[in-house]
Amino acid sequence: DTEVTQTPKHLVMGMTNKKSLKCEQHMGHRAMYWYKQKAKKPPELMFVYSYEKLSINESVPSRFSPECPNSSLLNLHLHALQPEDSALYLCASSQASGANTDTQYFGPGTRLTVL
Amino acid sequence: AQSVTQPDIHITVSEGASLELRCNYSYGATPYLFWYVQSPGQGLQLLLKYFSGDTLVQGIKGFEAEFKRSQSSFNLRKPSVHWSDAAEYFCAVGAPGFQKLVFGTGTRLLVSP
């Protein structure tokens, strides 16, 4: 089973709200990723967690705060977002085998709208 | 640093016709190459990947891709397109030992009746 689940499917929030996106996988993968995708663009990497430790932060603004509570779960906490942060947020996971670029498996995404 | 070029922004193919989507990469060594497909508002689904070995790779949904080192290409092909293949297709390249994937800008496939 190569399933990554994401909740919620859609989220509408105001600029002063605090919300969280959730991602879960049960494939035993030890690397998890957050991507942001604007319309008609490729996904842009935001964060990578490897063995529950943050290994890559692509200079993402601090209003996005990732958290990896355990090897199966990845959260993205959102606070004081701007309208330009509206996008599809994708989660992915991979084995983190170390030597190779692992195959990343993506979830269905959360469509975020910031008003 | 790696880079990927997908020269066709969109392609229209008649249902039942063959398809080839182009992907050119830039990387100093043997790259790891992927093709993903994305339906509107959905996540990315892996179609196939190339790490090493046989340069003709078979994937899901009847797709295949051929790695050509001399041309720095990894083109995606399908012999007979179905209306359900209409989607955005992304080629991606990775470097051994690194977790980052570099995506191309995507090619939108339209299928006409």
Image (cartoon, grey):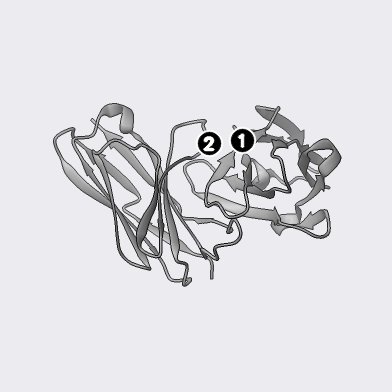
- Percent across and percent down for residue B112 are 72, 34
Dot 2 corresponds to which residue? A42
Residue A11 horizontal side relative to residue B25, left or right: left
Say the numbered circle drawn on residue B73.
none
Give the residue displayed 15% in from the left and 40% down from the top. Answer: A17
Q: Is residue B21 above or below residue A4?
A: above
- Percent across and percent down for residue A25 are 42, 66
Tell me the chain of label 1.
B
Residue A98 horizontal side relative to residue B66, left or right: left
Residue type (three-letter) at the residue carrying disc 2 = Pro
Q: Which secondary structure, mark 1?
A: loop
Quadrant, the C terminus of chain B: top right
Give the camera-side residue of A110 and A55: A55
Are callouts 1 and 2 both on one chain?
Answer: no
Give the residue displayed 65% in from the left and 27% down from the top. Answer: B9
Residue type (three-letter) at the residue carrying disc 1 = Gly
Dot 1 corresponds to which residue? B104
Structural crowding at the residue carrying mark 2, measured as other residues with C-alpha within 10 Å and reported as few (<14), some (14–19) or many (≥20): many
Q: Is residue A58 above or below residue B47?
A: above
Quadrant, the N terminus of chain B: top right
Structural crowding at the residue carrying mark 1, measured as other residues with C-alpha within 10 Å and reported as few (<14), some (14–19) or many (≥20): many
Q: Which secondary structure, mark 2?
A: loop
Give the residue displayed 64% in from the left and 44% down from the top. Answer: B93
Find out whether the residues at labels 1 and 2 contact each other: C-beta distance under 8 Å: yes
Rendering quarter of residue B39: top right
